[in-house]
Amino acid sequence: MAVEALKLIREREEEGRKLIEKGKESAAKILKDAADEVTRLKAQAREDEKSLAVQILDKYAKGGAEVEEEIMKNAETEAEKRKANAESNLDSAVNVALEKILGLV
């Protein structure tokens, strides 16, 4: 009976050691899987960050292009006004210059 009890104790101890080893392996796998998931999530976050940065840059570049277009349109309009004004004053400027040259004034 005592021999059988000792044998049963050894078997239970062996089973306990196996369970502990299996638990350690399971915990190690869980930790590795978690570390892999963290790495994957970090990489995904970096990709999302790049994508968001591109979207923001595109948005502001487009806005900048629209502002630039408006400025250029206004500048062209102003240039045309000044050109027309200069052309309208050209005749009188030529007349004044001729009068001075010819001594008529």
Image (spheres, grey):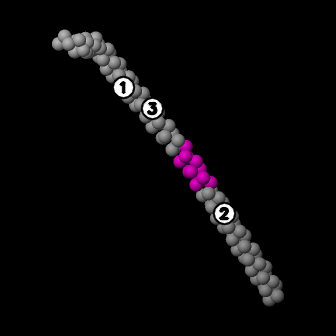
**Looking at the image, is mark 2 or mark 3 nearer the viewer?**
3
From where the camera sits, is residue 66 visible? yes
Q: Measuring 49% from the left and 40% from the top, which residue is drawn there?
A: 57
- Residue at the disc numbered 3: 65
Residue 44 place in picture, x, y as percent: 59, 50
Q: Nearer the viewer, residue 101 or 71?
A: 101
Tag 2: amino acid = Lys
36 in relation to 89, above or below: below
Residue 52 place in picture, x, y as percent: 52, 43
Q: Is residue 42 left or right of residue 69?
A: right
- Residue at the disc numbered 1: 75
Judged from the image, the secondary structure of the residue bearing numbered disc 1 is helix
Tag 1: amino acid = Ala
**Gap in angstroms between the C-alphas marked 2 and 3:** 49 Å
Q: Nearer the viewer, residue 29 or 42?
A: 42
- The image quadrant where one finds the N terminus is bottom right
Q: Earlier in the sequence, mark 2 or mark 1?
A: 2
Q: Earlier in the sequence, mark 1 or mark 3?
A: 3
Tag 3: amino acid = Ala
Judged from the image, the secondary structure of the residue bearing numbered disc 2 is helix
Based on the picture, tell me whether residue 45 belongs to the magenta stretch.
yes
* Residue 24 falls in image quadrant: bottom right
- Residue 32 image label: 2
Q: Nearer the viewer, residue 79 or 102?
A: 102
The secondary structure that dominates the magenta segment is helix
**Gap in angstroms between the C-alphas marked 2 and 1:** 64 Å
* Residue 31 falls in image quadrant: bottom right
Based on the picture, tell me whether residue 48 belongs to the magenta stretch.
yes
Q: Measuring 41% from the left and 31% from the top, which residue is drawn there?
A: 68
Q: Residue furthest bottom?
A: 2
19 in relation to 99, above or below: below
Residue stretch rendered in magenta on the structure? 40-51
